[in-house]
Amino acid sequence: EKFHEFKYDGGIISFVSLLNKNKNVINSEPIYIEAEKDGIIMEIALQYNDGYSEQIFTFANNINTYEGGTHLSGFKAALTRTVNSYSAANNLLKNVKESLTGDDIREGLTGVISVKIPEPQFEGQTKTKLGNSEVKGLVETMVNENLATFFEENPAIAKKVVGKSIEAARAREAARKARDLTRRKGALEFSSLPGKLADCQEKDPALSELYIVEGDSAGGSAKQGRDRKNQAILPLKGKILNVEKARFDKMLRSDEIIVLITAMGTGIGKEDFDINKLRYHKIIIMTDADVDGSHIRTLLLTFFYRQMLEIVERGYLYIAQPPLYKIKKGRSETYVKDDAALEDFLISTGVEGVRLNPDKGPITGSRLSAIVKKLVTLGKILGHIEKRKKDRYVVEAIAVNNSLKNLKNEEDIRAALEKVSSYIKSFYGMERYLDFNVERDEEHDCFKVEVNSKESGVAYRTIIDKDFLSSPEFKEIKVLCQSITAIGSAPYKIETEAEEIEVSHYQGLVDVVMNQGKKGLYIQRYKGLGEMNPDQLWDTTMNPDNRTLLQVKVEDTVAADEMFTILMGDQVEPRKNFIDTNA
């Protein structure tokens, strides 16, 4: 279970800092303006980063006006005017042919605008757009006055903002030239569809599907296996450009991106994008079910989220679920989509005819299957812990005995550590080197334990403190360890249709069930979609009667923006921390 707890300390300044947490910021402290005029109170916090997207959240009387409104219009007009006025007054635009546009100035801007109004008027389908006409002029005046004063008092920050905007203007001009060049070549024309696109016969976008397929080989199979009436196929070669790290002009120089834009027909960029020209209302990303396929899928998701968000917001973007394995037994064939699904299949098949502890009220069927699945998950988590040079057996022993609940009393801790030693010895038959060191944890006003251990020449160092015991990882281990308690103490007797087996550890039970599940099976792992013939691809992934599609939705824009920044951005450390936490 995960949750986020927000505090109002620092208000919208803290909110803006949070939004830019994993980004390289231009101004280390957010610009903050608070003003009041004619009964309207306005608060604004602004901070620039070196990215290429703008992210502005607006609120009226604490209601999230995500459709914008008059307060946003007033802010945009004032920001554009103030930055241009400051630039002209200080001769900062001498190498720029024309004034900076609003888009130039807002590139890389993260902002929060909050207004308090006596009688708010909300518009739009969901009533999340502020409609008070008087607010635009008042916000514009307040931002003009206060931001101009801020720039005069903080020239270093002002020059950074102008410099960032000038860079954006130059990139915009380069993008215009690139766009004009591609237009002259006919690459972005609706009438000139890319040669690699196998279009469908249907002309109604609501009934048409576009499969974006990884690789020419898979593209060939998809073209042969599809329903030509309404399914179009667009094969892409290799990994597309990471648009999180690329400016618009560089993106327009990417052949694969141009092919993608042209196939969809919408155009690209704030000036040219038109959702009404979209040629397909189901755009389906179909990549291999392996790590490379996941990477390509993430690159495509980044492109759609950053450059064609309206396609996602309208529910037009989907992810196909091709199988990773084909399982054959006799004449029957089953397809499973990934390693986890294969594991589930083998366990469900393997428990058939298996009885655990037949002398003590046998555990069989679905109950045995559920226990084995939990034991498999437990083994994986403990394996991850071991890779971090922590002792998996010590962690397991603490979780099973639930013996270190209280770190306040040193005597209780030492008694609990005796139980840890005896558990490892009795359960695993191990005489292993264990050195326990109990010391004060001043930060949490309790004790912590350092366990140094060794097995087969490998040294482990395990810190058991308040943070570890309250971590989501350890809480999950405790829940999973209940499965060990449920099957009693070793040794375990297992009865199959052919023999009786005795194992000394729960991993032995897992191995028996898995081996039973594999008997008589031929398991084929697909290295890629290209290994499937057209009929198989149609049956498993493209046939509307059989296929599974995942619809891409954005339910939390803050979390989505943070995720793309962490996974696809420049900073390595946040990405490493994300992997460590979620692996």
Image (spheres, rainbow, N blue to C red):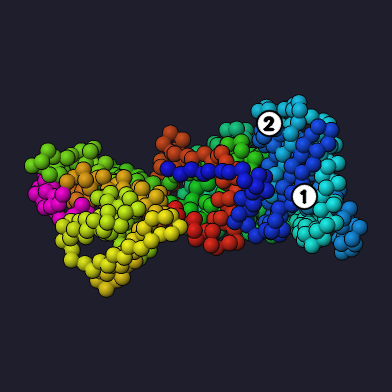
Of helix, strand and loop, which one carries label 1?
A: helix
Residue holding disc 2:
128
Residue, disc 1? 103
Asked if the residue at tag 1 contacts the one at tag 2, i.e. Cβ–Cβ closer than 8 Å, the answer is no
For the residue pair 213 and 556, the one nearer the viewer reads as 556
Q: Magenta stretch: residue 224 in it? A: no
Q: Could you say which quadrant of the image residue 86 lies in?
A: bottom right
Three-letter code, disc 2: Thr
Q: Secondary structure at mark 2?
A: loop
User: Residue at left 57%, top 46%?
Assistant: 560
Residue 104 seen anywhere in this rendered image of the structure: yes
The stretch drawn in magenta includes residue 507: yes
Q: Position of residue 403 (x, y in %)?
A: 27, 51
Residue 200 lies left or right of residue 442; in this view the side is right
Is tag 2's residue or tag 1's residue first in the polypeptide sequence? 1
- Find residue 145 and report its horizontal and vertical position in percent: 86, 46
Task: State the residue at coordinates (85%, 46%).
Answer: 144
For badge 1, the amino acid type reads Asp
Q: Is residue 342 visible?
A: no
Say few, some or many: other residues with alpha carbon within 10 Å of mark 1 (under 14 / 14 to 19 / 20 or more): some
Foreground: 377 or 336? 377
Q: Residue furthest bottom?
A: 457
Quarter holding residue 388:
bottom left
Q: Whole-percent x and y of residue 577?
A: 49, 58
The quadrant of the image that shows the N terminus is top left
Locate residue 376 relative to residue 581 in the image: left or right: left
Residue in front for this viewpoint, 449 or 82: 449
In this picture, is 258 found above or below 455? above
Q: Residue at x 24, y 56 (%)?
A: 415
